[in-house]
Image (tube, grey):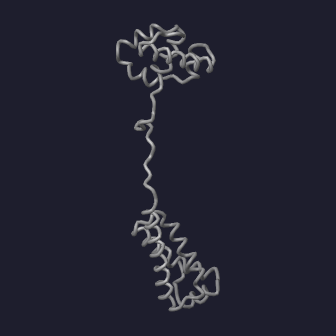
Amino acid sequence: MAEALTDEVLQHARRGEPDALATVYRSLAGQVLGYLEAKGVDDAEGATQDVFLTVFSRIGDMEGGVSGLRSFTFSVAHARMVDATRARARAPWVDEYSPEEDPRRSPSPQDEVMDRLGSGELAAVLDGLLPDQRECVLLRIVAGLSIEETAAALGKSAGAVKQLQRRGLLAMKKALEGAEVHV
């Protein structure tokens, strides 16, 4: 059980005695934290620590006993709350980045192929690929296998799978755009 905050404890705290300073902190920190949280301070715990850094640095000059200490502590807490409110008002508004909503984004060949997956022209374009490219594209894009899984299924290296996929998707993109396919 924490020692009560008395004028005697405050006198010891003014002399910088650690146990007395700890008693001051334990007696007031919960109330200060509750006040800062109720006022909507984002980092109420950090602000509480700032309050007590200020209080402890000036505790030797404090007058008015325990009542004066409480008044001073909560005036510092109020000032930290005002500082936090002003800082929040000055801070820029931050919105999380969503690549799907970014208008600067250009679709990859994979995205374009997947957009046309349901259409009949995709089957014809797949038929126009080299057999290894077609298998790679089907395993990677349609079946959703990883590069390593596709490499194992095709008996090829991961690098070969990457090249087959890239070339296959580019060939499909050109074919879907109506251009001649040169692989």
Residue 63 coordinates in the image, percent (x, y): 53, 91
Looking at the rendered image, the quarter that the C terminus falls into is top right
Tally of numbered discs: 0
Q: Quadrant of residue 37?
A: bottom left
Q: Residue furthest left?
A: 119
Relative side of 137 to 119, left or right: right
Q: Residue furthest front?
A: 179
Q: What residue sits 54% from the left and 18% below the top?
A: 165
Q: Residue at image x 50%, y 12%?
A: 134
Work out whether residue 39 or residue 174 is closer to the camera in this orientation and state it: 174
Q: At which x and y percent is residue 74?
A: 46, 79
Viewer-closest of 6 and 2: 6
Percent position of residue 69, x then y: 51, 85
Q: Is residue 81 above or below residue 59?
A: above
Q: Is 81 in front, or is 6? A: 81
Q: Position of residue 181 (x, y in %)?
A: 49, 10
53 up-or-down from 164: above or below: below
78 sits to left or right of 52: left
User: Residue at point 54% right, 19% down?
Assistant: 166
Q: Residue at x 49, y 17 (%)?
A: 137
